[in-house]
Image: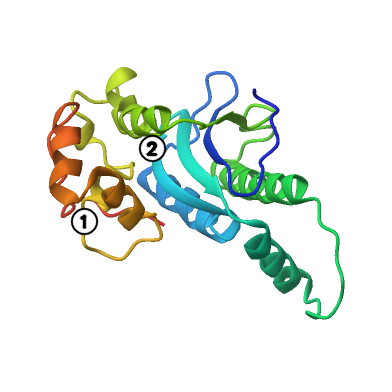
Amino acid sequence: MYNSPLLPGQYYHLYNHAVGNENLFRQHENYLFFLKRYGQHVFPVARTYAYCLMPNHFHLLVQIREEEELMTYYRQQKKLPLEQNLSLDYPSFVMQQFSNFCNSYAKSFNRRFDRKGALFLDYLRRKPVETEVYFTALLAYIHRNPVHHEFCRDASDWAYSSLHSIGSKKPTRLERNAVLDWFGGIEPYIAFHKQICVAPSGEDWEFGF
C-alpha cells in the first residue's frame, strides 16, 4: 500500500509526517512556500482535488496525469524534440517529482531555521482511491483533519486547506470544477460540508497554489 507505484490516471490519497517531534510548518510563510513549491514540482504531474496542511503533516487527494501529459512535461524539462522516440518509466518520473518537491522544501526549511537532517519521514505514504465512496469520504476526511487532530474546533477555522478555495470564485489550480461537478454544484458541496463544518465562504483565506 505505502509503496504502490504512482500510475498515470490513478487517484491517490497521499500523506506524510515530519520526523520525530519536528513540525513541517512553524510560520505562516512556511505554508505559503510549501504550496509554491508544490505548484512548481507537483502540479505538472498531478491534478489536485483536495489538500490540508497541518503543523506536522499533510494530506492530498490527487490524480496522476495521463501518460501523454507526463511525456509532454518530461520533454519540456529535458528540452527534447518531439520527433525523438522515448521510453519513460512514468511511476518513477512522477515519484521523482514528489521527491524533488519534498527535498526542495526541506532544504529551504533547514536554511531558514538553521537545522540539519531529514524533515519528512523516509517515504511518501499513498493509498489508491479506487471507489467513488472512498473519493467522497476523503474530501470530508482531509478537510476535517485539523479538527480530528484538535488543531481547531471547526474545519472552516483552518486556513491551510482547500476547503475555502473550492468554495471560492478566485483563480486556483485546484480541480475546483471537477469537485463541484462531483457534488452537483456549489450548493450541494456546501451542504455536504455543513455536515462536518461551517460552509466555506472563500473570502478570508486564499492560500492555494
C-alpha span from label 1 to label 2: 16 Å
* Residue at screen point 68% across, 35% down: 116
Number of numbered labels in the structure image = 2
Question: Is residue 47 depicted above or below 197 in this figure?
Answer: below
* Residue 11 in the image, given as x and y percentages of width and height: 53, 40
Tell whether 196 sits left or right of 100.
Answer: left
Tell whether 146 sits left or right of 189.
Answer: right
Tell whether 155 sits left or right of 102.
Answer: left
Q: In which quarter of the image is residue 123?
A: top right
* Residue 134 in the image, given as x and y percentages of width and height: 41, 28
Classed neighbour count for the residue bearing mark 1: other residues with Cα under 10 Å, few (<14), some (14–19), many (≥20)? some
Is 154 in front, or is 141?
141
Residue 14 seen by the camera: yes
Q: Is mark 2 on a helix, strand or loop?
A: strand
Tag 1 residue = 168
Q: Which of marks 1 and 2 is nearer the N terminus?
A: 2
Q: What residue type is labelled 1?
A: Ser
Question: Is residue 138 depicted above or below 76 in this figure?
Answer: above
The quadrant in which the C terminus is found is bottom left
Q: Quadrant of residue 158?
A: top left
* Residue 124 in the image, given as x and y percentages of width and height: 63, 32
Question: Is residue 137 depicted above or below 91 in this figure?
Answer: above
* Residue at screen point 83% across, 81% down: 83
| Viewer-side label of 1, 2 | 1
The quadrant in which the N terminus is found is top right
Q: Is mark 1 on a helix, strand or loop?
A: loop
Q: What label does residue 52 carry, if any?
A: 2
Task: Tell me, yes or no, whether the two marked residues, 1 and 2, touch with CB atoms within 8 Å.
Answer: no
* Residue 92 in the image, given as x and y percentages of width and height: 77, 46
Residue 150 seen by the camera: no
